[in-house]
Amino acid sequence: MRRGPMRRTARASGSPGRTAPVCLSSMPSTEQDRRPSALIWLLAVVSLVLPITGVGAALYGIFKIVNDAAIGWAWLAAGVLLLIGDLVIDQKWSRSITSSEPDLNRRGEQLVGQVVTVVEAIPPDGRGSVRAADTVWPAEGATAAAGARVRVSGCKGTVLTVEAV
């Protein structure tokens, strides 16, 4: 088997001596783009170190204050400033993250616009159930008999809002 310059070998699961080819160049560019950048790693390390050193400095400051040392106030202030700095960094960092798929873990919202089958009849101003793929969801909205096809128009928690097709 011919191996290009970007190939590596990885151990095949379950067999200690066998290897399987792994081609790094076949990774889609979107996967390569999702790798964390150096800035993200730096922010992660800073967000780990700041609270630890801040709490340590604050505790040391309290210890010094209890033992009548004036320098304790400086240590306490430094600890509080480190903790506040970490909170500011975390707030700025968390706001800047946007998802390319905002409905990823919102299955009900992913169903909006799809045509589904009514499993349990939906009475006027009542609630029935519909089947979307392999899941039965509670539904309300348009009156529909069992077996009818309806379109999902919205989602309130786990209850789908449906309309006639």
Image: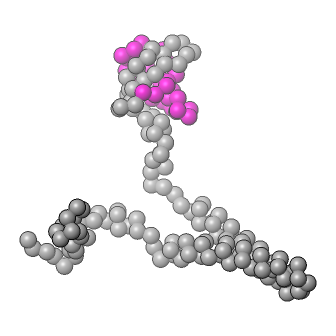
77 vs 103, nearest the viewer: 77
Q: Is residue 8 left or right of residue 41?
A: left
141 vs 86, nearest the viewer: 86
The answer to whether residue 148 is magenta is: yes
- Which quadrant is the C terminus positioned in? top left
Q: Is residue 121 above or below residue 88?
A: above
86 vs 71, nearest the viewer: 71
Q: Which residues are magenta?
A: 136-165
Q: Position of residue 106 (x, y in %)?
A: 49, 42
Residue at 87 percent across and 80 percent down: it is 65
Q: Position of residue 41 (x, y in %)?
A: 50, 74
- Which quadrant is the N terminus positioned in? bottom left
Q: For residue 45, say whether it is visible.
A: yes
Residue at 43 percent across and 20 percent down: it is 164
Q: Is residue 61 above or below residue 121?
A: below
Q: Position of residue 152 (x, y in %)?
A: 45, 29
The answer to whether residue 87 is magenta is: no
Q: Position of residue 70 (x, y in %)?
A: 89, 86
